[in-house]
Image (cartoon, grey):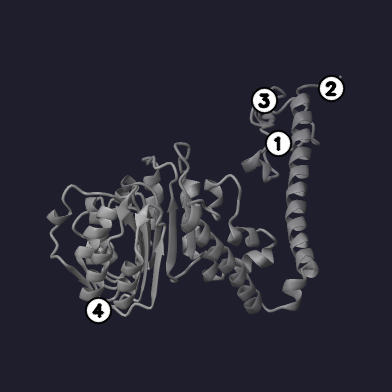
Amino acid sequence: MSNPHVRNDNRADLTSNYSLWDTEDPLNLMSDYDPAKCAIDDGHPCGKCQELGEIQADIRRAYDLLKISAQKRRGVKGKINQVHDHLIRRLPPELISRIFKTRIESSDDLAQDTIENSGAPIRQLPWLSEVDLSAPLILSAVCRGWRQIAFSTPDLWTTVVIYLKPRDIHPSAQHMLQLTQWLDRSKDLPLDIFILEPSYAFEATYLKLFDVIKAYVDRWQSLTLTSGSKTWRKLLGDGTFTLPKTSVLEHLHLRRLSLSVLPVQLDYYLSNITMVTMEYASVSDFFEVIHHCPKLRKLDVNVMIWDDNPESLRLEFPILHGSLEFLRLCAFEEHFKFLLDHLVLSSLNCIVLSFRSGRDSSFPADKLISFLIRSKCPIQTFELWDLDGLHITDSQLIAILEHL
């Protein structure tokens, strides 16, 4: 039997041998008891605490070996990827970057067509979508070499598609960081922003996202909103935020909103816009865009709402616009008559008209002819669509063609 008062010179030192486990302890194994605090054996740990200390030292050594081995494995695996990756072995990074850009451009074109035609997003930030269809991140996830090239290619990160899911998204600090990193990778290039809100049910938690996006407003090139007016006002029209007059914003695509609710600074937002799409607009919205977008070249609009008194707008009628070249207008007969009566579009070369009408409605040929005579525009393309229910005679068509 050992004498408890005789110190064992072979006793383990339980207070030294620092390990990564001391700060990480992933399994939470050694937080409930510290054998080094035992002082039963003449101020030193007892035999069982000594045994426990030795076991814990073995655990620390095993953990450190596992940690170091895992780090070595990542390094070797990265080198294996380089050896096995025919793309990186055979092509310089500059050429791979161009290949990546071609891939992303095709994805962006598909996203643009899909969003404009159906309102459904094809590319979404991964933390806001159930299925990750984000091409830049997919390329970045292949291997370290691809990731380094993708992260250093700003063109891959200039399109930001945010899908606001109804009532179940609460962006965290990690979400904000991910969005900021995406935007930062685009460097100084112009940005195409898509904010998709199919539910039209604005949530206050979205404001965190808007704050991140607004920090990059001087680089906005296009803004697509498929949302209600509340989202638009919260993003741009809250009275505390204005776009700089030097904004590069050129393309505005809006769905289901009313521009007439915005503050007077609207002209700052739209002064550089060259293309506008509105899929649920009022007569006043139409005139506001024409008035506040002097550089507008393409306007695609569905006029679905009749204002009580559009002439109450502080605008001088008729409204003259010298830059608009393309107009696609879908409207009810009464909207159509009013709009053409108050417009002069001297540069218009393509006009596409689509009518919403009831039975026995007459085609307003006289209004269209009057507009053409007044505008003296060089029409090269003239199209009529959805004429079901509208009575149009051969003589009316001939008269219209004579004034083109």
Give the label, 2 or 4, closer to the camera: 4
Residue 7 appears in the figure: no
> Mark 1 falls on what kind of element?
loop
Number of other residues with Cα within 10 Å of mark 2, as a class: few under 14, some 14 to 19, many 20 or more: few
**Disc 3 to disc 1, C-alpha distance:** 12 Å
Q: Earlier in the sequence, mark 1 or mark 4?
A: 1
Question: Could you say where residue 39 lies in the image, as x and y percent from the top left?
Answer: 67, 25
Residue underneath mark 2:
2
Question: Three-letter amino acid code at disc 4?
Answer: Lys
Write down the residue under mark 1.
14
On residue 376, the disc is 4
Q: Is residue 182 left or right of residue 23?
A: left
Disc 3 from disc 2: Cα separation: 17 Å
Secondary structure under badge 2? loop
Which badge, 2 or 4, comes first in the chain's sequence? Answer: 2
Left or right, 83 with respect to 199, comes to: right
Residue 230 screen position, x and y as percent: 31, 45
The residue that label 3 is drawn on is 39
| Disc nearest the viewer among 1 and 4 | 4
Q: Is residue 306 above or below residue 271?
A: above
How far apart are the alpha carbons under marks 1 and 4?
95 Å
Say what secondary structure mark 3 lies in. loop
The vertical placement of 152 against 25, above or below, is: below
- Secondary structure of the residue carrying tag 4 is loop
Give the quadrant of the C terminus.
bottom left
Residue positioned most to the top: 1
Q: Residues within 10 Å of mark 1 (few under 14, many from 20)?
A: some
